[in-house]
Image (cartoon, helix red, strand yellow):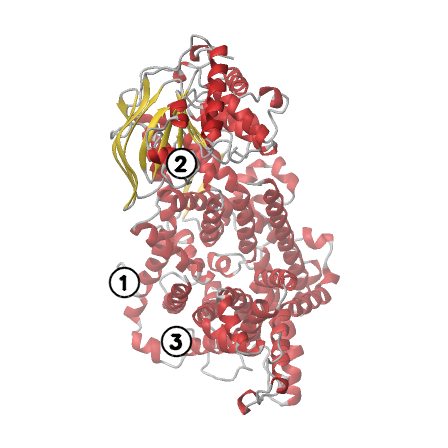
Amino acid sequence: MLNGLSTIVRDRAAAQAALQPDLKASTKPKLEAHNLSFYYGATQALFDVTLSIPERSVTALIGPSGCGKSTFLRTLNRMNDIIEGTRVTGKVMLEGVDIYEPGIDVVALRKRVGMVFQKSTPFPKSVFENVAYGPRVAGHRGSKALAELVEACLRRAALWDEVKDRLGDSALELSGGQQQRLCIARALATNPDVLLMDEPASALDPASTAHVEDLIFELKQNYTIVIVTHNMQQAARVSDRTAFFNHGHLIEVDATPKIFTRPGQKQTEDYVTGRFG
Amino acid sequence: MSSAPQDFPTSPSLAVQPLGLGPRFSLSRAREQAIRLILLCCALASILTTVGIIYVLLSETIFAIPPNEAFFQLVSPWHFFTDTRWTPQFSDRHFGILPLLCGTFLVAGIAAVIGLPIGLAGSIYLSEYASRRTRNLVKPILEVLAGIPTVVFGYFALVFVTPYALRPVFTGIFGCDVQVFNAASAGIVVGIMIIPIVSSLSEDALRAVPQALREAAYALGSSKYHVSTRVVVPAALSGVLASFLLAISRAVGETMAVAIAAGQTPVLTLNPLRSVETMTAYIVNVSFGDKPHQSLDFKALFAVAMTLFVMTLVMNILSHLVMRRYRETYQ
Amino acid sequence: MSATAMGPGIGVPRTRASARPSFVGPLFAGACATSAWLGLGVLIVLLVGVLWQGAGWLSWSFLTNYDSRHPAEAGLLAGLWGSLWLVVLATLFAVPVGVGAGIFLEEYEKKGWLRTLIEINLSNLAGVPSIVYGILGMAVFVKMFGALQGRPKVLEIGLRSAHLDIPLPFGRTVLSGGLTLALLILPIVIVVTREALRAVPSSLRQASYALGATHWQTIRHQLLPAATPGIITGVILSVSRAIGETAPLLMVGAAVYLANSPGGIETPVDLVKHPGGVLEAPFDSFTALPVLIFNWISRPEKEYRHVAAAAILVLLGLLQVFNIAASVIRARFQRQARW
């Protein structure tokens, strides 16, 4: 199992080197969690997590189901605030500013830190209106500028060619893979710095999954991406760094090749080799 | 496809810049709060309605702002509730509500005798016996029945029930006198009117009974009849009772059908074949004249209305309490 | 499924307790089935009866005549227009307030004493007899608590090319009737809005928040549009209810005999030809379809019974149209919203 993953990792590193010889994954941290603990009412779901997410890279969060990786992801854009009875201790720093400080404008935060959900949730509106929604609620008006923005986002999400004649059609008529890419385009429209993706391809067929993974690969040149996935091959394919969660604890985080070939912790090795989870 | 972020078309407000996560500016926050306030006022409108009803009723009957006088300051509550004559228009004025109460209960009683059993039996059929297809046919029919305006039922009572149902039976066979306006015709149609209420609410209650209970009874060798009557209905009793209470409350509050068919003679009687007057019919009949606001006749209207309101309120509250008890049992 | 379980073949002797007549089961089932189908029977008898009495009196002139002392010439016109104005005013007032209240209860105040108070209040209001609403309307709108007794005023509001003359107190006008009906249907609109909002999947809400939308923006751009078909269906149903209401209108002063329509508008063309009438209509005296029916039934001449029956047919027909409209809307949007 480890051998298979190492092959994937080696191939990918070669591909990356061939493509962008001088663009290294940056090491400057974009997002940092410091001693982050999270509670659903009385139940503690995250225990003292300290994790740093470098900018313009892909960080994968892996772990068995229920380990807290999705919960952690949602603390990064304060989506957990919507759920009643949740509590956070510790800090999450976005470029040095603690986003949990009182007085922080959560609405602005979510424009900087975008999210794509597991099940694609296009709005019951047209393709165009879906992408334009973020800028519109931000106060963006000019129709020409909006049209350009929508086109740019759809191109970035590798969806433009497929929908350019159907911008007015309902988004619900797209296929599953197209809908998910639409949601990615929609998230890009607010010009975020960070993209959080919660198992973005788990509901898709292999062809669409490959599309989405290629997309992530391209997007990381401009965005910081944090992706939760239960598919280890996927993590090995797309991410630069991988963090392994178990039972709400961050067990190990390191460069992806190292996690999948020579993990430091036994738990990590057990998970990655498929002994549990 | 590797343009740097700065090539991405943006408007100045979206451009990447120093964090700008500080407290959102007062304009937008203020707007959100203003909207919340407006919506709160909308929600308070319903409370205003209740407050209005209570105020209007109380201010004419119990507390009045001078020089206005309240009804119960002019007529003693004792007389109001015990006098057996209601003759506000005669020279010898009596304001005893008992005749009106009697009329109301006579009509509601007949309605209950007709509507409650039929509604319950119908709900048992829908819940225990009927196929899904049958249910999908019967339920819309009941909804149509529920949507028919009460004037239509009043018409039906006067023009059909009395001459073609009551008279042939009671005058033809039993030789009793059936007046043109009578409590029985009104009671019958009000009973028909409340069938959908009892049916749908009781059916909900019956269907909420866990299937496991029925299966246990069947496994012990019970027939469907036994299971329905000895197991399911008793298990759903509170829900069924709640529906009964609501239906009776509706029957008590029914106005037009009784105004048309039951008559305008307030009497204390148990004879359903004669003309009576219910509280609701009295209110309607009085409002036709252009009585001055200060006259005692007019104030009597409010006293009757308040009695009616309190009665239906008590029944509705009881019904909700009973319903809550049934919900707690199963959820 | 209705047979008893055990018989002699199993070797267990039948005890006395289980030896009951075997016709009770089927009899009971039959009684229940009859009860359930009784509604259909009643509807058929009702319809046949009304058709028999009134079908012969239906004609185009019946719809375009006013009430008359001669039964053969009596018509519905005043009632049709009156009901139309009443319904328009009632929805104009009840829908914004009701939808707003529904949004507030579902989106803003999720728990606390205020919410509990409002909910108890709503469930009580649903059980109040409609005539009590009529009394409320009479005291508040028609008489305004007797405040301006004997000294009625007229409030003049100038608009661009016309002006509104609002009588104070409102008196026995369409406005009073419309407001009273609005209070009557308000609880229905609130309940319907809440259910429609609840049916919107939370994933839509989350996606909107994740894009940086505020609470109100999410409501306005995502939740309300998604809930609109359900709300519209509910409004149509409450209109059906309002059209059939008689008692509150009688309390509020619906006229017993009326030979004109509110604002003098008698045909749809008049709406355009005499726009001034539109501004006068809410302050005119009025009657309504069910009120006409009530009046005609109460008249001594037997011919009026037929006129009443014809009017009932028109009323039932209108209600059926609304019913169908609501079903069509509900079906069409359920197909579209494939969450």
Specify the farthest residue to the right. Answer: C56
* Closest to the observer, C186 or A182: A182
Mark nearer the viewer, 3 or 2:
2
Say which residue appears at 64% left-offset and 82% top-offset. Answer: B167
- Asked if badge 1 and badge 2 are on a common chain, one would say no
Say which residue appears at 54% left-offset and 57% top-offset. Answer: C255
Please give the residue where the numbered disc 1 appears in the rendered image: B63
Sort mark 3 into few (<14), some (14-19) or many (20+) by Cα contacts within 10 Å: many
Contact between marks 1 and 2 (CB within 8 A): the answer is: no
Residue A271 is marked as 2
- Report in which chain the residue with disc 1 lies: B
Task: Please name the amino acid that badge 1 sits on.
Answer: Phe
Q: Quadrant of the C terminus of chain C?
A: top right
SS at mark 3 in the image: loop
* Real-space Cα separation, disc 1 to disc 3, in angstroms: 20 Å
Task: Please name the amino acid that badge 2 sits on.
Answer: Tyr
Return the disc, 1 or 3, that comes first in the chain's sequence.
1
Q: Quadrant of residue B26?
A: top left
Task: Please name the amino acid that badge 3 sits on.
Answer: Ile
SS at mark 1 in the image: loop
* Closest to the observer, A55 or A157: A55
Mark nearer the viewer, 1 or 2:
2
